Image (spheres, rainbow, N blue to C red):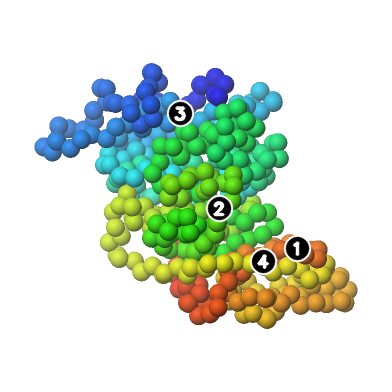
Amino acid sequence: MSEEGDEQSACESEGETLVGADSGTGPTSGAGSGTAPGSGTGKPGQRVAARREAIVIGGKSIQPGQRCYVDLPLPPLYTHTSVAMPVHVIHGKQPGPVLFVTAAIHGDEINGIEIIRRLLATKSLSRLAGTLIAVPVVNVYGFVSQSRYLPDRRDLNRSFPGSETGSMAARLANTLMSEIVAKCTHGIDLHTAAEGRANFPQIRVDLDSHPELLPLAEAFAPPILVDSTTRDGTLRGAAGNLPLLLYEAGEALRFDDLAIRAGLKGVLNVMRHLKMLPANKSGERRGKPWLANNSAWMRAPQSGILRSRIRLGGIVEEGGVLGYISDPFGESEQAVISDASGVLIGITKLPLVHEGEALYHVATTESTKSAARAVHDFHLEYEQPVMKRLKY
Ligand SMILES: [Zn+2]
């Protein structure tokens, strides 16, 4: 489905600077099966360990110990401008899992892009076991137009697994599935709330279908785990039995520092859990996430202007007031009452609401005690070192 296949790649080997060349443009056999003729950079070792095979992404053969950028060609714009999905591959010398980390499947959800930028700058990746495939901008078209959607108004995350001959969204989904997901053993997909809303950091997993995901989700160590079924057409659904975590945090078109830091740490935690990275020497304390089995949206009882009385991560009690809606004169005021107890994991940021609109997303529970502890621990972990982070 590539038009001209003139994609670029640039690689560097461990300990070298960028060399601006790719290693294998010749005919390649199937995914991950390329060998490495003439590129033996390792000294003859005493151990006769089996050498890792190259991984092939976008027709480029990436050798063990190499970091490469690969551009996967996508349908061009009608301006004749070519479009490509940028992919960064780190193929470790040591064997291990093959993990993809994707962001901006919804083109306006940019926190994940910054998480991946910080991830790729992490020094310990030089000791990577396995392979990291980072795709910071999946929906390139939506990213350029600062939109959740594709130019045809389709939602990419309702278009998986896609097909080679389907809609534009289906083709993009198919490229991601065949070039990246099919070659991986694990995945993390980074999202934010849709425009006009914000999410408290959370991992969503479908534990009914995939109970084996619980240790991986706990390793990420978000404050909240939400057990939710997958929707048709999502990457999470199309991934099938591949262990995939969905991270939701922050809002569209905004950087949320807490969401970014928690996301970066979560990805690194998962990589340590999978033994792709060495364990943290400091034995850093990690809070245990609180697992929510259900969630519910509290809706506007009338149209008007909303004043919220609660913040993200706040504890909600059944019958408690979440906010007030009134007309512009402050008359006909009505309280928004929660009909469940739990933690506020999503909130509207636009105070102009119509009757019935979803305002507050509550992860529900009978007893809020353990939820409150998880949120408290999370804030302790992330809010202290604010001044040290200005380097970023
Ligand atoms: Zn999203």
Labelled disc at residue 335:
none
Please name the residue shown 83% across and 77% down the image.
333
Which residue lies under the disc numbered 3?
Answer: 58
| Residue type, mark 3 in image | Gly
- SS for callout 3: loop
| Residue type, mark 2 in image | Thr
Please name the residue shown 48% across and 33% down the image.
178
Please name the residue shown 39% across and 18% down the image.
27
Which circle, 2 or 1, is nearer the viewer?
Answer: 2
Q: Is mark 4 within 8 Å of ligand 1?
A: no
Please name the residue shown 47% across and 63% down the image.
222
The picture places residue 269, in percent across and down from the top left corner, at: 38, 57
Which residue lies under the disc numbered 4?
Answer: 297
- Dot 1 or dot 3: first in sequence order is 3
| Residue 304 image-quadrant placement | bottom right
Distance in Å between CA atoms under marks 1 and 4: 9 Å
Q: Is mark 1 within 8 Å of ligand 1?
A: no
Foreground of the two, 349 or 209: 209
Which residue lies under the disc numbered 2?
Answer: 230
- SS for callout 1: loop
The picture places residue 344, in percent across and down from the top left corner, at: 60, 70
Which residue lies under the disc numbered 1?
Answer: 357
Query: Mark 1 and 3 residues: CB-CB less than 8 Å, in contact?
Result: no
Query: Mark 2 and 1 residues: CB-CB less than 8 Å, in contact?
Result: no
Q: Is mark 2 within 8 Å of ligand 1?
A: no
The picture places residue 266, in percent across and down from the top left corner, at: 43, 58
| Residue type, mark 4 in image | Trp
| Residue type, mark 1 in image | Glu
